Image (cartoon, rainbow, N blue to C red):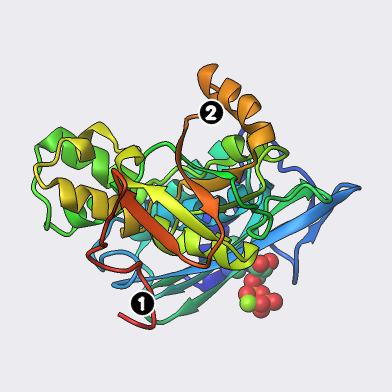
Amino acid sequence: MGEFELIRRFFQQEQAEHPPEGVFMGVGDDAALLEVPPYQQLAVSVDTLVSGVHFPADADAEDIAQRALRVNLSDLAAMGAQPLWFTLALTLPNVDESWLRDFSRGLFAVANQYGCALVGGDTTSGPLSITVQVMGVVEAGHALRRDGASVGDYILVTHHLGDGAAGLAAVEGRLKLDAEQDEYLRQRFYRPEPRVAEARKIRDLASAALDISDGLVADLGHICAASDLGAEVYVEDLPLSPVLAGLEDRDQALNWALSGGDDYELCFTVPEEHMAEVGLLIAQGELQATVIGHMVAGASVQCLHHGQTFELDQPGYNHFHD
Ligand code: ADP
Ligand code: MG
C-alpha cells in the first residue's frame, strides 16, 4: 500500500455526523483552507508523542491515537478555545494495516466527540512518532492566559489530580491494583478528558489558567512566573479520586497529585469578586472544581500540609533534565 492509498483509507474518512465547520478545503490539496469566523482569534498548538518517551513502545494503537489528540485538545481547552480542526504528522516504522485501522478508529472517535476535523497532515517512515497540531477559535480578547493572576486570587483545579501519574505507574506495572481500579487509572492515562466545556464556562471569571501536563507544582509555577507572583497550595485540599484516596501509601498519592504529571486537568485562578459565580457553577454541578490554594506575593509555589511545609519527593517531569 502506497502513501496516498494509506492516507485515503485511514485518514480521509468522512467525519461522521456533523460536516466539519469552516473547512473550505481539507485533506487532499497542498494545504487546507480554513475559515476563521469574524471577531475570533485562531488558537494553535502542536505536540509530539514519541514512542518509548510519551507512551510505552508496546501501547495499543487506539490508545496512542486517543492520547495524542486528547492532550492537544487539552491545550486548546486551557486557552478557553473551541476546537475546530487538526493536522496529523505521522512517522511509521512500517505499514501495519491492523495498527493503522486501530489508530484511525481511536483518532476519529475523539475527533467526532469534540467536533474537531482532520484537515491535513504528513506521512513519513521512521521510528514511531505522532505529531498533532490542533486549531480552535476563541472570541478576541477572551482567551484564558497564564499572566493574569493577582495576589489573593483563589487557585482551583478541575476534577481529580494524580490519576495520570498513577495511571502511568499502573500501565508500566509499578502499581498493582484490582482489575477495576487498574482499568480506571489506565483510562485516565490514555484518555485524559480535555476540559473544553469547563474552560468555556470559567473563561470570563478566571484571571489565569493552564492545563496540568507536567504536574501541578511545575505548571502552577508557570502561572506564577507569567503573573510575577508566588502561590500557596494546601495539600490537604487536593482533590483525589476514590482510587488514589484509597492507596495505602498516602504520601505517594499526594506526590503524584502535586508533581506526577499527565493529568490534563485545568488549574485556574479566580479573583475574590468572581468566586461567588464560580461557587454557583460548582454547586449547580456545572463545573467540578476545588479550591486548593491562593496566589501570594513572591516567586515560588509553596506546598503546605495543615500549615506545615510539605516537601516533594520529585520535581515535575522535564524532558531535558531527567
Ligand atoms: P505534499 O507532498 O504536498 O506535502 P503529501 O503527499 O504530504 O503532500 O499529502 C497529500 C495530502 O494528504 C495533503 O492534503 C496532506 O495534508 C494530506 N495528508 C498526508 N498525510 C496525512 C495524514 N497522516 N493525515 C491526514 N492527512 C494527511
Ligand atoms: Mg507532505
- Residue 215 occupies quadrant: bottom left
Q: Is residue 16 visible?
A: no
Expressed as whole percent of the image width and height from the top left, the position of residue 71 reads: 48, 55
Which residue lies under the disc numbered 2?
A: 287
Q: Is residue 151 visible?
A: yes
Q: Residue at x 71, y 57 (%)?
A: 43
Residue situated in front as seen by the camera: 84 or 215: 215
Residue situated in front as seen by the camera: 275 or 195: 275
* Helix, strand or loop at mark 2: loop
Ligand 1 visible in quadrant: bottom right
Expressed as whole percent of the image width and height from the top left, the position of residue 242 reads: 24, 32
Mark found first going from the N terminus, 1 or 2: 1
Q: Amino acid type of disc 2?
A: Leu
Expressed as whole percent of the image width and height from the top left, the position of residue 248 reads: 9, 42
Q: CA distance from mark 1 to mark 2?
A: 42 Å
| Disc 2: CA contacts within 10 A as few (<14), some (14-19) or many (>=20) | many
The reply to whether the residue tagged 2 has its Cβ within 8 angstroms of ligand 1 is no
Q: Is residue 282 above or below residue 291?
A: above
Q: Which mark is residue 93?
A: 1
* Helix, strand or loop at mark 1: loop
Which image quadrant: the N terminus? bottom left
Q: Residue at x 25, y 43 (%)?
A: 185
Q: Are the two marked residues, 1 and 2, in contact with CB atoms closer than 8 angstroms?
A: no
Q: Nearer the viewer, mark 1 or mark 2?
A: 2
Q: Is residue 36 above or below residue 289?
A: below
Residue situated in front as seen by the camera: 133 or 181: 181
